[in-house]
Image (cartoon, grey):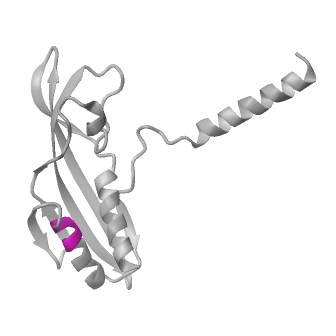
């Protein structure tokens, strides 16, 4: 290999390695909590409006800063793994499930931990109704990818700007 070819090879490998190093992990979560630079009294109505406009609220307590939503069915395409991945992390290439339905509820807390700063934490609980070729059908818990939680947090931050 001549020097010009060797340099070209090093450049190609370097660019490839940089691309690999910066590529997001397929299991990388979006954020599920945020510190908002505003007092709880200002954040709370925005949080209630944002959550309540899209999800039925089951329980709410302003003093403790907690909101629990009812279980809702998520808009996914029957047996379309890609549509499920919009919300949850699902099995790898060897998974032998057919994903049929997805449901979710959230537990949210808003806490003012110092003056003018409020922490919002959103815990989404997802269950998918799956069919397994050997084990039949069942509801299974799947970890959230944070997409719904991140969108709620972003919308609240946008309204405060």
Residue drawn where x is 33% and y is 65% of the image: 153
Residue 133 sits above or below residue 124 on the image: above
Image coords of residue 61 (percent x, y) = 13, 74
Res 126 seen here: yes
Q: Is 51 one of the magenta-colored residues?
A: yes
Residue drawn where x is 28% and y is 45% of the image: 87
Image coords of residue 38 (percent x, y) = 37, 81
From this viewpoint, which residue is outermost toward the front? 77
How many numbered dots are placed on residues in this image? 0
Residue 24 sits above or below residue 134 on the image: below
Residue drawn where x is 20% and y is 40% of the image: 76
The image quadrant of residue 96 is: top left
Could you tell me what secondary structure mostly forms the magenta stretch?
Answer: helix
Report the span colored magenta: 48-52
Along the line of sight, the residue nearer the viewer: 50 or 68:
50
Q: Is 33 one of the magenta-colored residues?
A: no
Residue 152 sits above or below residue 22 on the image: below
Residue drawn where x is 60% and y is 36% of the image: 20
Res 65 seen here: no
Q: Judge from the rendering whether residue 38 lies leftward or rightward of residue 24; answer left or right.
A: left
Quarter of the C terminus within the rendering: bottom left
Along the line of sight, the residue nearer the viewer: 49 or 114:
49
């Amino acid at each position: 290999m001549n020097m010009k070819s060797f340099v070209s090879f090093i450049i190609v490998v370097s660019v490839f390695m940089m691309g690999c190093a910066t590529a997001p992990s397929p299991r990388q979560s979006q954020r599920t909590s945020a510190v908002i630079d505003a007092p709880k009294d200002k954040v709370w109505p925005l949080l209630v409006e944002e959550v309540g406009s899209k999800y039925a609220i089951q329980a709410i307590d302003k003093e403790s800063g907690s909101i629990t939503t009812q279980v809702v069915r998520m808009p996914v395409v029957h047996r379309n793994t890609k549509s499920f991945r919009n919300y949850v992390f699902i099995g790898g290439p060897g998974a032998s499930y057919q994903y049929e339905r997805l449901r979710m509820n959230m537990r949210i807390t808003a806490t003012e931990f110092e003056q003018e700063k409020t922490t919002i934490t959103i815990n989404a609980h997802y269950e998918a109704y799956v069919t397994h070729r050997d084990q039949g059908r069942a509801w299974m818990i799947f970890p959230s990818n944070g997409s719904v939680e991140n969108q709620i947090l972003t919308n609240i931050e946008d309204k405060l700007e």
